[in-house]
């Protein structure tokens, strides 16, 4: 079985290629969508999970709460990635600088977006106690390097009591950056 940190790093690095292919003006537009995803998960994730659990319980199912929450969060992450990358999206003005500087900028923004997406998914997977064990995708224990990397995910770095304020500030900064020329 592949260690979870190797899987997460591989997923994160795929965003590098996306960043190179799309270039930074498009990737910065995607960043707005990913920060909005983090804000939605931060503000409404628990309530949505409770609502789904109540619905399943009312339907006569005895759900594994953490697994249901993980599936819901995974769905939000996947839908966000799909909508951010599919079709017309926000595009910042300008073009990527030619040569190595432009490539470095493209890679950096791609890595940042990968950190937002994969890091968020990993954070919630970790917080819920790796319910993917039910699917046979993970076997305990998490290695020491995996624990250190999970502690560096976006939501793990934000203070819990004010995380939404930081996310709103980042979202507003990105929107102002988009509007200001």
Image: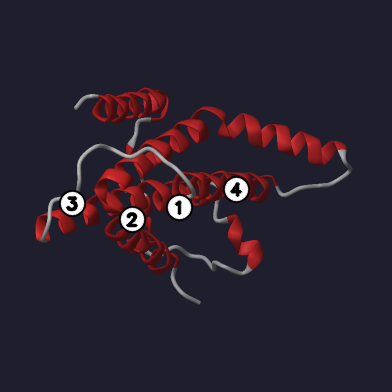
Q: Residue at x 41, y 30 (%)?
A: 160
Q: Nearer the viewer, residue 22 or 39?
A: 22
Residue 170: image location, x then y, percent: 31, 29
Q: Nearer the viewer, residue 1 or 88?
A: 88
How far apart are the alpha carbons under marks 3 and 1?
Answer: 25 Å
Residue 5: image location, x then y, percent: 39, 64
Question: In the image, which is nearer the foreground, mark 1 or mark 4?
Answer: 4
Question: In the image, which is nearer the foreground, mark 3 or mark 1?
Answer: 3
Q: Earlier in the sequence, mark 3 or mark 1?
A: 3
Question: In the image, which is nearer the foreground, mark 2 or mark 4?
Answer: 4
Q: Residue at x 24, y 37 (%)?
A: 93
| Left/right of residue 25 with respect to residue 134 in the rendered view | left
Give me the disc on residue 36: none
Residue 132: image location, x then y, percent: 59, 60
Q: Earlier in the sequence, mark 4 or mark 3?
A: 4
In the orientation shown, which residue stands out farthest toward the bottom?
A: 1
Give me the disc on residue 105: 3
How far apart are the alpha carbons under marks 1 and 4?
Answer: 13 Å
How far apart are the alpha carbons under marks 4 and 3?
Answer: 29 Å
Query: To which residue does mark 1 refer?
Result: 122
Q: Are marks 1 and 2 in contact (CB under 8 Å)?
A: yes
| Quarter location, residue 145 | bottom left
Q: Are marks 4 and 3 in contact (CB under 8 Å)?
A: no
Question: In the image, which is nearer the foreground, mark 2 or mark 3?
Answer: 3
How far apart are the alpha carbons under marks 2 and 4?
Answer: 23 Å
Residue 134: image location, x then y, percent: 66, 62
Query: To which residue does mark 4 refer?
Result: 75
Q: Which element carries disc 2, helix, strand or loop?
A: helix
Q: Earlier in the sequence, mark 1 or mark 4?
A: 4
Query: To which residue does mark 2 refer?
Result: 149
């Amino acid at each position: 079985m592949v260690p979870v940190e190797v899987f997460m790093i591989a997923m994160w690095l795929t965003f590098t290629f996306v960043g190179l292919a799309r270039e930074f003006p498009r990737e910065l537009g995607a960043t707005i969508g990913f920060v909005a995803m983090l804000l939605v998960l931060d503000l409404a994730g628990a309530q949505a999970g409770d609502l789904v659990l109540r619905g399943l319980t009312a339907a006569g199912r005895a759900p594994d709460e953490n697994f249901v929450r993980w599936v819901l969060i995974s769905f939000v992450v996947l839908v966000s990635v799909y909508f951010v990358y599919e079709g017309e999206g926000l595009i910042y003005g300008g073009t990527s600088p030619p040569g190595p500087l432009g490539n470095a900028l493209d890679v950096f923004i791609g890595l940042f977006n990968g950190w937002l997406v994969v890091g968020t998914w990993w954070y919630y997977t970790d917080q819920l106690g790796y319910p993917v064990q039910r699917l046979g995708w993970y076997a305990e224990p998490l290695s020491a390097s995996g624990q250190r990397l999970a502690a560096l995910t976006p939501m793990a770095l934000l203070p819990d009591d004010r995380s939404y304020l930081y996310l709103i500030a980042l979202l507003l900064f990105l929107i102002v950056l988009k509007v200001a020329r």
